[in-house]
Every structure is written in C-alpha cells, then in structure tokens.
Image (tube, rainbow, N blue to C red):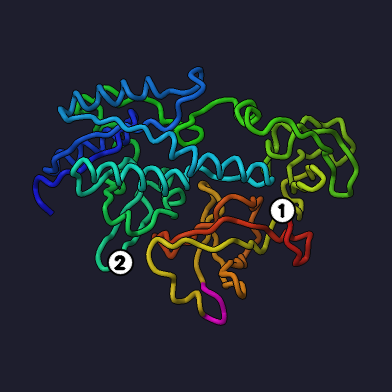
Amino acid sequence: MGARELVIVGISGGVDSAVAALLLQQAGFEVQGLHMTNWEDDAAHCTAAADFQAARRVCEELDIPLHRANFSAAYREQVFADFLAEYRAGRTPNPDVLCNRHIKFGAFLEHARRLGASRIATGHYARLEINATVRLLKAADEHKDQTYFLHAVPGTALRHALFPLGGLHKHEVRAMAAAAGLPNYDRPDSTGICFIGERPFREFLGQYLGSEPGPILDAEGRELGRHQGIAYYTLGQRAGLGIGGSTEGSGDPWYVAAKRPAGRALVVVQGRGHPLLWSGQVHTGPPRWVDAVPARLENAGGWRCEVRLRHRHRPAPASVWRDDGDGDLRICFDEPQWAAAPGQYAVFYDADACLGGAVIAAATSLADEGEPSG
C-alpha cells in the first residue's frame, strides 16, 4: 500500500463520511471526495442541494478536491424499479441493500477507477479483513453496525473498499469532527430511504402505486375495516391501521399479521404474542455470499449460524438447509422470531462475520403448523 495511494471517499454531507476522509488523510493517503446525486425529484423533500453544500464545505476544510456524479438513472433502473415491484407484489423491500450493491459499490467504484483511484471509502460502520478471502465484520459500535445493509456487496468490490469508521463509536466520530473543525460535526444523521430521504412514505409511494383498497380482516375472516392498499403496510405494523379500539376483541393493540394480494386483504391480530406473528421457519430465495459459500451448508444436519431478519434484529441462532433443486434456503430458528416479513433480507452471521444473505420469500407462523404464509 503506497503512502500516496489515491482513495476517493463518498462524501454525503454527513459527519460519518467527513471523518472517514479525515482519517484517511491523516493516514497519508491522497484523498479526494465524490458527492453522488441519485434522486432528483420532489424538491420539497429531497435534501440533495443542502447535502452537496455540506459536502463542499467539508472538502474545503480538508483541502481536498470534490467531484460530482449523477447516478440517478442507474438508481431508478437497478434499485427503485425493484423497490416498486416488490411493493406491488405485497412484499416489503429494503432498497438500501440494493443501493449499496449497485450504486455505492458498483457505479461509484467504477467512476472512482476512471478518476484514477485504486480504492474507495465510505462512512459505513463495518470492518473488513482482506487476505486470500474477504471477511465483512460487524462494527465496534453494535448500535451503528451496518453489515446488514452491506451483505449483498460482492467480495470482489469490497477488496477495493475501506471503512475507516469500523473500529469507532459514533460519539468518537463526532468528537473527532469537532476537534478537526469540520463544519458538519453536529449535523443530524440522515434517515429514510437511501438517497430519497425522509418524507411522508404513504404519500410518496402512492404517487407510483395508486390506491387499491381492500378489507382488513381478523384471523377468523371477519371484516374490521378497509385499507387503501396492502403495499402501504408491513408485517408487525401497529400504527396507522385505523381500527383503534372500536372493534370487538381483547383490547390489546392490533398488528398486521399477513397480506393476501389475491384478495387485497390485510389480516390483523390482537396482541404482540399472537402465534400468527411468530415464525419458527423462514424460506428464502437464492442467497448471495460476500465470499465463498459456507462449506457447512452442505451438512446433512444443516448449517449452524445466526440470522438477522431486520437491521435492528438481534441475530438469532438457527439451522439452515438448502431446499432441493433451486438453491433456495430453509431457516429453522431455535426460538420463534417475530414478524418475519417477505421482501426483507435474512442475513447470516458466524460470530462477528457477516457471510451473506437472501430475500425472505415466506415465513411459517406458529399458527400455520408447517404451511408457509406471507
């Protein structure tokens, strides 16, 4: 690794990418920034202009060049189109996973190479060990760990990546930014959909999916109300159902337990402990692995690992088998898991190592006794 190796850092305007650039500069790299524009509509909610100005001020303070690139066409084709298709099918997608795979570690990496960089860096909270193999490891700050969102990035791309914040906690990052005089040291973290930002979600989605009303049913099939489209709900959702406490029942909160696209029906149950909300098995599509396929996956008794079903979900012990024929996976948890949502990702861990993941196709609830639902 040369002392003046060129690394281009994705500068979003936030404090994390700013400190990533600072640390690489302090380590002796030649550092340049690149600000990505990937969404250009809805100026009322899009923060692209403010983000670029924040990125520009950071690069001025660090005295490094700042490039701009517009990947909005690639984002719409490779990320947003899938996002809408999944919602139309009644599933709950996670566009940040595809954004990392196709944009941040695809289009950005290719663009940086054209600019002469050997590697790129981002402000992600994750760690890398690169030798003969590529190991994607959890961050030191478990509350900020982003390996769930990075699991679909191939090892061939990660070999050219750096994550300078992987060994740090968020409070340390902000302190470093303040000490260095970076102007965005106290800028709030970004939230919402990758690049699209935080906005009234149902209103935004409605621009593309429209209204497809249908019945809200309880577990026995009784109609409790109406909804404007099952795309606007996810399994385990409690708020926004519009049925409140006026319906008959136990008085416990109502939760979305299933979506039935064929009849546009939304199934709700009362109480977080209802068996329709808990799954012992999850079925997925074909997995993507960071590096090699785990050899133990071929074991007759199943591959033992931990599985995370959401970003904030604590990895849960499970056995994983290949389904016959098509390469899909069947995950059997040691303990039932709550609200496994088709369209989200099951991500596999071996201790601190994130090995890969797969899209959840269906979950077997405790009430179904072996028949997949969702």
**SS for callout 1:** loop
Q: CA distance from mark 1 to mark 2?
A: 36 Å
**The residue stretch that appears in magenta:** 299-303
Q: Amino acid at mark 1?
A: Gly
Q: Is residue 300 magenta?
A: yes
Q: Is residue 114 left or right of residue 197?
A: left
Q: Amino acid at mark 2?
A: Thr
The residue tagged 2 is 133
Q: Is residue 354 magenta?
A: no
Q: Quadrant of residue 200?
A: top right
Given residues 4 and 268, the one toward you in this image is 4
Q: Is residue 325 left or right of residue 219?
A: left
Residue at left offset 62%, top offset 75%: 324
Q: Is residue 345 left or right of residue 30?
A: right
The residue tagged 1 is 374
> In the displayed structure, would residue 174 be above or below residue 83?
above
Task: Identify the main secondary structure in magenta.
Answer: loop
Percent position (x, y) of residue 118?
A: 20, 49
Percent position (x, y) of residue 343?
A: 61, 50
Percent position (x, y) of residue 89?
A: 68, 46
Answer few, some or many: residues within 10 Å of disc 1's Cα (few below 14, many 20 plus, some between 14 and 19).
Answer: many
